[in-house]
Image (cartoon, helix red, strand yellow):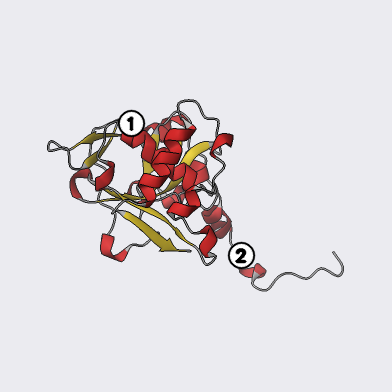
Amino acid sequence: MDGINAMHGDAKCKKYDFNHDKVHYFTDKEREEYEVYFTPSKDGTKLIGRYKHNDEYIPESIDISERDDEDAHHYMWNLNRTMYIVVDELWDEAKYGLVKHTGIVAGQPALAGGEVYFKKNGVLWGIDVFSGHYKPGLEHLSMLYQWMKEEGWPVNSIHWMGLKERDKSRSWTKERCDMIRWHKIEIDGFDVDDLRQSCYELTTSPYWTLIED
């Protein structure tokens, strides 16, 4: 059209670039391959993750001392409290493009989503809720903490990661727990008073870590 110029570099765009950036929505069958379950270690001090369909350990993610979001495993925790963890090396990126949180649950609502970190033999090291699409908050991480606590799992062996934002009033600290409108959370199976208490426990845990925004 007259008066409209192509953006710089548009002429070099290729179909591959568009396909690489698109979001692949998992089918039910694809999603089942990434459903996981957890059990405490024999001594009860660690939480072990395995894939439900083959009982194999969730692979080790990264050198934890060099935390890198690009190498962490993606997870989604859906409304039925089922967790799916997608490991990049098990995913056909050439065919489907990069794994996206919204793709794992096919764009459906969820309780939480982010990155998860594992050591050898399926040991869960840490978890966050840093999904760029769903943008969960401290209340969602508190739900995850509450769920694991109610299951009797060793929550104090897990590194819980929150946001240290530029605006200190919005950083995920204990004081932030007081700012959440807990009474507006109406999700079956979650008691708001328990969630508030879990938020306090979470943000004062020795394994609580704030990551720069």
Mark 2 is on which residue type? Cys
Q: Position of residue 144 (x, y in %)?
A: 40, 39
Q: Position of residue 84 (x, y in %)?
A: 39, 38
SS for callout 1: helix
- Identify the residue at image location x=39%, y=41%: 198
Q: Which residue is mark 2?
A: 13
Q: Amino acid at mark 1?
A: Glu
Apparent side of residue 80 relative to residue 125 in the rendered image (left or right): right
Q: Which mark is residue 35?
A: none
Dot 2: what SS?
A: loop
**Mark 2 crowdedness (10 Å alpha carbons): few <14, some 14-19, many ≥20:** few
Does residue 143 appear in the picture of this structure?
yes
Looking at the picture, does residue 137 appear above or below residue 82? below
From the viewer's perspective, is 115 left or right of 97? Answer: left
Name the residue rendered at 78%, 71% in the picture. Answer: 5
The one nearer the camera, 157 or 36, is 157
Say whether residue 16 is left or right of residue 210: right
Point out the residue furthest to the top here: 188
Residue pointed to by mark 1: 150
Nearer-N-terminus badge (1/2): 2
Spatial distance from mark 1 to mark 2, Cα to Cα? 51 Å
Residue 43 locus on image (x, y percent): 12, 38
- Say above or below: 22 vs 2: above
Look at discs 1 and 2 and give the one toward the viewer. 1
Residue under the image location 38 percent in, 51 percent down: 203
Q: Residue furthest left?
A: 43
* Furthest-right residue in this view: 2
